[in-house]
Image (spheres, helix red, strand yellow):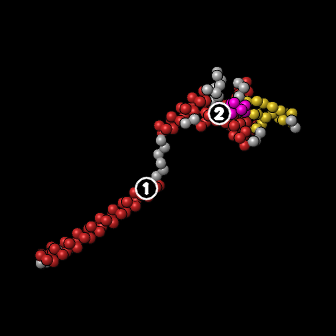
Amino acid sequence: MSPVRAAEMTDEQGATANSAGSETNRDHAREIEEIAQKLGALLAASTPARPDVDSYLDQELARRKARRKLGGPFRPKGIAWDVLIYLLKAGREGRPVSVSDAVLMAEAPRTTALRAVQELEAAGFIKRFADPHDMRRFYLHLRPQVSSAVVAALVTD
């Protein structure tokens, strides 16, 4: 509204105009507040929960401690640990695992993976047995007491 027109208004007309302007401002403020609340709700719903780092670290330390209990002087880690977990999973699914399968699963150089298998066997963690139908093929089996120790190391809270 121009200053000339505002000066020509009576006091009553000015009060009515101010009242209408205040009401419009209140309506806008309410709309802005509603939009802000909706945006806040959308943001909260779309933001992934931040992982509890301290809890994760505690769990990882407990798992490592349980893993250290596995093997006296030989503590499986790296590829050997991967082979143990693979054998555990296959055993729970009732699948036999050949030495070749374990080596392929390890995704490491063949000699390195074979060395890990030999170390696990020498430590008494796994048992190697021949395929009754093909004496060239050998299967690996996780010993039961080792199986339960690996499960405990994986699920320790």
| Residue 10, horizontal then vertical, whole percent | 12, 78
The quadrant holding residue 99 is top right
Q: Is residue 113 in view from this perspective?
A: no
Query: Residue shown at 23%/69% (left/top)?
Result: 22
- The overriding secondary structure of the stretch rendered in magenta is helix
The region drawn magenta spans 142-150
Picture coordinates of residue 143, whole percent (x, y): 72, 31
Tell me if I can see residue 11 in this picture. Answer: yes
Residue nearest the viewer, comparing 85 with 2: 85
- In percent of the image, x 42 and y 58: which residue is there? 41
Residue 119, quarter of the rendered image: top right
Q: Residue 24, how many percent across, how many down?
A: 26, 70
Front label number (1 vs 2)? 2
* Camera-side residue of 114 and 98: 98
Above or below, 80 against 30 in this view is: above
Q: Is residue 7 left or right of residue 113?
A: left
Please give the residue where the numbered disc 2 appears in the rendered image: 150
Q: Tell me the amino acid under the disc marked 2.
A: Val
Residue underneath mark 1:
43
Picture coordinates of residue 147, whole percent (x, y):
68, 33
Left or right side of 102 for 75: left
Q: Quadrant of the N terminus?
A: bottom left
> Which residue is rendered at x = 64% and y = 21% of the image?
73
Q: Quadrant of the C terminus?
A: top right
Q: Secondary structure at mark 2?
A: helix
* Circle 1: residue type: Leu
Q: Are marks 1 and 2 in contact (CB under 8 Å)?
A: no
Location of residue 53 with respect to 111 vertically, above or below: below
The secondary structure type at the circle numbered 1 is: helix
Q: Which mark is residue 77?
A: none
| Mark-to-mark CA distance, 1 and 2 | 41 Å
